Amino acid sequence: MLAGIDYFIVIAYIVGMLLLGLYFKKFVNNSEDYFLGGKSLPFWAIGMSIVVSDIGALDFVGVSGQAYRYGISVGNFDWVGSVPAMLLSAFIFIPYFWRGGMYTIPEYLGRRYNQKVRTIASVTWILFFALDLGVLFWASAVLLNVLMGWPIWISIISTAGVVGLYTYFGGITAVIMTDVVQFVIMFIGGFALVFLSLYEVGGWDNMVEKISTMGPEYQTHFDIIQPQDTKSPFPWTGILFGLTFVMANAYMIGNQSIVQRCLTAKNEWHAKASMIFGSALKMFIPILVLFPGLMAVVVHPGLTDGDQALPLMIKSILPPGLVGLMFAAFFAGLMSSVDSLLNSTATLFTKDIYEPFIKKGADDKHYLKVGQIATLVLLLIGVATSPVSSDFPGIYVAIQTFMSYFQGPIFAILLLGIFWRRTTQWGGLSALIVGIGFAIYLNVFKEHFFTIEDPFLYISWWSFLLGVIINVVVSLLTKKHTDEELKGLVFSSKILVKNKKL
């Protein structure tokens, strides 16, 4: 249970975030303000928001749990995966999305291919974000249950109520500016836990010695590169092909909740700089979220559920006051992840589904209200689907498995769409449909094709590769787009020329 000072810190944090988020309500006058912040935000705020939304509750609980089970190899998702992908996104893709005045990634795909591609991609992301919300709510319940003994559903509903309120009123400006404060709190609380945990286990060398003598299953805990035949979800072949080439790029280039933040930038320079700044901050994340789970192997050996490693470390290591700060840090990560998913999914639904198919040509205030209502509906869906993640061996695996169903094919059509002028609308549509179907097939019958328990990295790679092949073959057999149709949508050396608007 939390001490009195901890309750005070947590309550002060929650009230402060609510007031700060609601303050930005006065800046929301139209749909562009709600979805893109009026294109007025600076790079440093966007960069911090990108990082804090990407390392929320999922990473604090899930990555610590994976580190408890498998060791430091999970750190590849940031060191090898995220940083190169963020730089590619900053210099190649973000300028096109920002210059084109895009609201969503599927909007670009619709212009580059056709409306069918846009709709399928948008619906796919909406479904994923709805499930992702459920996973995040479940992560909050895990922490609250261990620390405070709260029932699972009470924890989930409380979290949803707090985050939903300011996201509904303040839009993406409230999301990004509250993320800045949450970033600071997360880093202070996270590093406090790392340093005190390291002291508890007697230093790094002592921890390595203790874990290495605990049994054969711990012999590879300090190997960042895992062998191809490992039983963990992180073999080097999967890390190289599935993560570095596909999933990381798909996440940083094609993920609406990440890219939408860059689209709120005041100009193209700030849009690119935000992703570059975020990539520098990303280098510290594995230390923050991985090490507590690793040290929990020594402090709390024999846990059947690795996702309890972080909550137990908080409970046993931190003194009163710092427990409240760490809880606030965790809640900050949770809130930043949930609010970004809510706003991004509302954007996808309003701009890609509602406006084109349900009510065209309505006034701007109508679309603003639709976005707000969609936020509330998605909140309810996230709460209802939260138990789904309990069926997976770890929260982190749950979310990566969901993503493996579609990220490979979507990245295939994004990559070819911007770099190969010959790609046609039918090539993109065929690649998307066949690729997603193939990924679903591999997931359903994974025990027949893969030896590891959770082969999401391999599934992402093979569905990406098939998507590329289908796209190329069908495109060569169908009518190509005209130069006028591709204007501003395909990469050229002119991207290096300074935009006259800057």
Image (cartoon, rainbow, N blue to C red):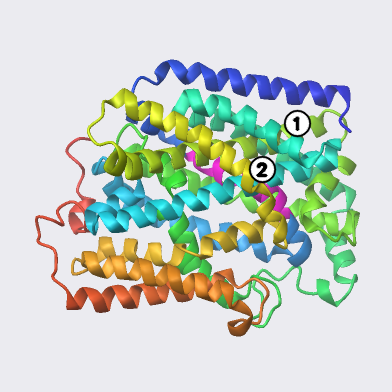
Tell me: 162 left or right of 281.
right
**Residue under the point 79% across and 20% down:** 8
Q: Position of residue 226 (x, y in %)?
A: 66, 75
Task: Please give the name of the residue rendered at 24% of the width and 68% of the height, measured from the top-left corner.
Answer: 426
Separation of marks 1 and 2 at Cα, in angstroms: 20 Å
Vertical position of residue 357 compared to residue 422: above or below: above
Name the magenta segment's main secondary structure.
helix
Highlighted range, magenta: 47-64
Q: Give amino acid for label 1.
A: Leu
Could you say which is closer to the camera, residue 101 or residue 447?
Answer: 447
Determine which of the numbered discs, if any, sits on residue 137 in the image: 2
Q: Residue 325 — which label?
A: 1
Q: Position of residue 297 (x, y in %)?
A: 85, 59
Q: Pointer 2: residues within 10 angstroms few (<14), some, or many (20+)?
A: many
Nearer to the camera, 256 or 98: 256
> Does residue 428 appear anywhere in the picture?
yes
Q: SS class of the residue under badge 1? A: helix
Mark drawn on residue 95: none
* Residue 360 in the figure: left or right of residue 184: left
- Provide residue 371's location: percent of width, then percent of height: 41, 32
Residue 52 inside the magenta-drawn segment: yes
Disc 2 secondary structure class: helix
The reply, left or right, for residue 31 in relation to residue 199 is left
Q: Is residue 102 visible?
A: no
Amino acid type of the residue that numbered disc 2 sits on in the rendered structure = Phe
Q: Closer to the camera: disc 1 or disc 2? A: 2
- Image position of 313 with respect to 440: above or below: above
